[in-house]
Amino acid sequence: MKVWKRNAVVAAIVLFVCAAVYLNWSYQKDGDTADVGKTLGQATLVGGQSSDPLVSTTPAASPDATASPAPEAQQKSGYFASARLNREQARDSALSLLQEAASGENADEAMKEELGLAIQTLADFTVSEAQIENLVTAKGYADCVAFIGDDSISVVVAAAEGELGEADIAKITEIVTGETGYPASQIKIIPTQE
C-alpha cells in the first residue's frame, strides 16, 4: 500500500514538473525575438496605458494617461493569462520537488527511473497543452487554455456569447483527441465569455 501511495505521489509531482518545464520553454521561446533582455513579469507600457490596477500612470509619463486600456489588453490580463501563470508556477514547483528527490542521497536507481519518467510525463503534458492551445486559437477562437491530467483533459475556450455550438465542440474535440489520443469521453470543453 505504501509503495502504491509513493508511486502515485511521485507520478503527480512528475506530471506537474513536466508541465512546468514545457511552459517555461514555451514562454522563453515566445520572448526570444521581441523581448530580448526583458525579465518575466516586467511590464512595458505603450502610450502610458496599462490594464494592471497595480501600475499607475502619471500625467508626466503620458499626456493620454486617462485613456482606457484596449479590450485586447484587458482580455489578455484576465482569466487565460492567470490560468497559464498558475499552471506554470505549479509545474515549476513540482519539477523542483522531483529534481530534489532524484538528486537526494536516499534515491535508489528504481526511484530515480520513476522520477525521470514522471518528469518526462510532465514535459509531454506541457507540450500537448501548448499544441492544443495553439491549434484551437488557429481555428479562430479568441483564446484557450488546456489542462491535462492523468485521466482527463479540460479545455477552457473563449466564446463570444459564453456558449459553444455543436460544431465548435466537435472541432475542439477533434484537436484534443488528435494531439493526445484521449477519447472524447475524457475531454471537458468549458466555454467562457471573453
Image (spheres, grey):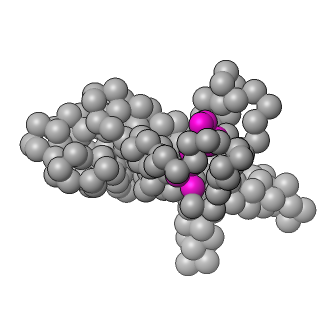
Q: Is residue 92 left or right of residue 11?
A: right
Q: Is residue 124 left or right of residue 160?
A: right
Residue at the spot 57% in from the left edge and 73% down from the top edge? 5
Which picture quadrant has residue 177?
top left
Residue 48 percent location from the top left of the image: 62, 42
Residue at the spot 22% in from the left edge and 45% down from the top edge? 160
Residue at the extreme right: 105
Magenta span of residues = 45-52
Membership of 119 in magenta stretch = no
Q: Is residue 112 above or below residue 5?
A: above
Q: Main secondary structure of the magenta part?
A: loop
Closer to the camera in the image, 131 or 6: 131
Residue 165 percent location from the top left of the image: 11, 44
Q: Is residue 61 visible?
A: yes
Q: Is residue 132 left or right of residue 160?
A: right
Closer to the camera in the image, 6 or 96: 96
Residue 22 percent location from the top left of the image: 60, 40
Image quarter (top left, top right, bottom left or bottom right) of the N terminus:
bottom right
